[in-house]
Amino acid sequence: MSGTVVRVGRLFDGRDGAVRDRAELRIEAGRVTEVGDHGTLQRPGDELIERLDATCTPGFLDIHTHFCYPIHGDFQRPTSTPGRLAMLAQGFAQASSWLQQGVTAARDVGTSFDLDIELAELLAAGSVAGPRLAPAGRMLTMTGGKRNAFDHMKDEVSGAVAARRWTREHLKRGAVVIKLYCTTLLEEDVAGYLRRALAAPEGARDPGRWASLSVDEIRAVTHEAHKLGRTVAAHTAPAFGVNLALRGGVDTVEHGSDLDDESIALFLETGATLVPTLSVSHHQIAQEDGGRADPVFREFSLRRWDRIQRNVARAHEAGVRLATGTDPVIPGMEYRSEIELLVACGLSPSAALLAATRDAAASLGVFGNDLGTLEPGKHADLLLFGADPTADIGAIRDLREVWQGGRPVPKPVDPTGVIQLEASHA
Ligand SMILES: [Zn+2]
């Protein structure tokens, strides 16, 4: 069978953070078959693609998306469920936009109607353009708690038996990842709570004001998911919630804006991954009013941002695995800033690129097995940059070509993704 040889100036294969000069990849049936030096892999009948000025990396992974999320304003208020068609249109547009930014695989951590499960099927069939998608469908949380804008995206359970049953059923529906909404603030007066939190010592949050799944409920979920090689993502911000989720055996912690010594120890002990979702926090504070009329939200966001950056640096120094996830629920967000923000937190460009590739894939269970690095057997999902991003992370803005499954992804004539994202907030 003939293949394709892609000959590049430099190759970051994602295995260890190193870059090799004058490398080439041989691709057959959508997968990498060999990696070698210039002029060593071409066989009779193979097509040769020469990109001698380019640096090649694996395709990026965004492991915290909500492609079908109806982008709107205040998350703390209950809202009516948006229309199914509007959400699917958003899903198509955002999936296409993310692929153009180099995201060749993603994990969708929650949407209404299990729409991301349907979207993942369309993407896998090639009916629409976008990343390979590991969907979570609806999220799971405890029965009760405060109503908020996420209500239409969640199911509720009480007790480990119910959690086990829900997990089995949800995996059967096609969820590749389980998303747990581990903690949620019960306070109706959020501004008042934030005012008190700002006056309290750093990181101190009153667990009594938070509702959460219990550790036995979380363990029941992780046990069932792991039996099938699937993984569990836990939404939680306060340190007690992070520690609870890690004791329950989750694979990734989403947000985790507060970490204490125990959190770091539990990450290292369990091998779980921190997905700090820097983009959404940064985007929030970059907006003039933090997206809110009340200045207390802005003050809280600014202080929290400072703490998040310190926690990411601390976790990385301690050896906790980090992965890129954007949580794109605010209009105007993009993927690339997540990698740049990891560098701003103190990671080297190579370490940030590993968080976007190898380490993101490592937390996805069997779904991630063929992703994240360029080595024999893996999907030939690759990116070609005009300069070396390990030397200057700014080079990720100079993305020349995106390849998925051994073929270049066409550039859209009409960048529908961008238009949709802006229009949806007008
Ligand atoms: Zn999210």
Image (spheres, rainbow, N blue to C red):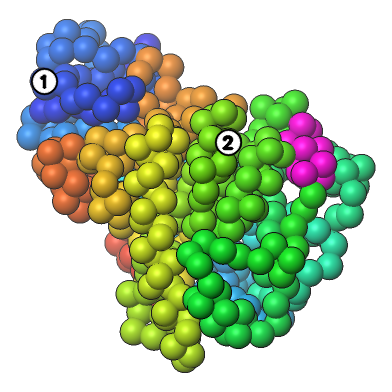
Q: Is residue 65 above or below residue 271?
A: below
Magenta stretch mostly in which secondary structure?
A: helix
| Lower sequence index among marks 2 and 1 | 1
Mark closer to the observer (2, 1): 2
Residue 402's x, y, as percent? 29, 42
Q: Is residue 223 magenta?
A: yes
- What is the span of residues highlighted in magenta in the rendered image? 215-224
Q: Residues within 10 Å of mark 2 (few under 14, many from 20)?
A: some
407 vs 423, nearest the viewer: 423
351 vs 64, nearest the viewer: 351
Q: CA distance from mark 2 to mark 1?
A: 41 Å
Q: Specify the farthest residue to the front.
A: 201
Q: Residues within 10 Å of mark 1 (few under 14, many from 20)?
A: some
- Which disc, if any, is residue 266? 2
Residue of label 1:
22
188 vs 81, nearest the viewer: 188
